[in-house]
Image (cartoon, rainbow, N blue to C red):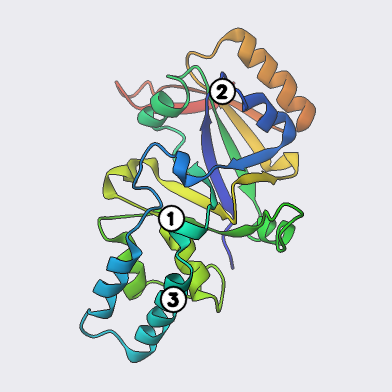
Amino acid sequence: MPKLVTGFKYRDVEHPYFWDTLEGSYLYCPSPRTFNDPFDCQVQWTRSFQRALATPGLTSERKDILKSILTAFEDRDPLKVLDPGVFCFTRDLRSALMWAHYARSHQGVCFYYRFPPTYFAKRYEQPDAEGFFFVGHDRVHYGNDAFLRWLLKGDLNKPSNGDAAENAVVKIMTTKARKWAYEEEWRIVTGKPGRLHFDPEHLEEITFGMRISKDNEEKLRETARRINPRVKFNRISIDQGFDYVLTAGPA
């Protein structure tokens, strides 16, 4: 049974598009070219395939599939001809680093989303008038050879059964260096940058940072309740049993 697509998103309330994304109920999937890590989504796939195909013990069936992907990539280099969109969730609500880096040093918030497993696939099966469409989603795999590891041992039929080349594109977009593992990401990949609209009830919880202003908190409560009356509110704080461990409770 496919798993639900769930995750947290740390947000800066002062970001120019913050209120627009909240009131418009959409996830904006930016181009990886705008990411702060220039190596993110830029796997040197030619080298990875060469290393994979030279690995002893590779079955002839898997080798044939890898060769077919390689041929598809050589005909249409995904890193040159594609400009995908990528939306990044995290699994960790209580990350001190994430609150500091992505929620304006606790002046922001963290959203919790919960979607059925095929929600976006059904809504965006075909490109819209502007060519925007859903490609797939997966948790991010961290490691110095994360993409190579998938080529050698991963399920080549996920997320799209029978389309190994498309799956390889998703994997390129969902592998990162080991140093980023603390972010515990889950990503949605689209055919181009753009907005993934959703029904408002799928934004289920909003957690306030420790330094959020009263004005921003009140505005958030009013706006979010108008969009989804059942949304829940939490607040991050220090767990009283520790010096530096964060916890969250109703606000």
Looking at the rendering, which quadrant does residue 99 occupy?
Answer: top left
Q: Is residue 221 above or below residue 71?
A: above
Q: CA distance from mark 3 to mark 1?
A: 17 Å
x and y, in percent, of residue 236 in the image = 48, 23
User: Where is mark 2, residue-wise?
Assistant: 15
Identify the image quadrant of the N terminus.
bottom right
| Residue pointed to by mark 3 | 69
Most foreground residue, 68 or 2: 68
Q: What residue is rendered at 45% in x and 65% in y?
A: 77
Q: Is residue 155 in sight in this rendering?
A: no
> How much space separates mark 1 and mark 2, taking CA atoms?
25 Å
Residue 73 picture quarter: bottom left
| Mark 3 vs mark 2: in front | 3
Residue matched to label 1:
174
* Image location of residue 47, percent across then percent down: 27, 67
Q: Residues within 10 Å of mark 2 (few under 14, many from 20)?
A: few
Amino acid identity at mark 2: His
Q: Is residue 236 left or right of residue 4?
A: left
Q: How many marks?
A: 3
What residue sits 23% from the left and 85% below the top?
57
If you read the primary sequence from the N terminus, does the residue marked by circle 3 or circle 1 appear first? Answer: 3
Asked if the residue under mark 2 is in contact with the one under mark 1, i.e. CB atoms within 8 Å, the reply is no
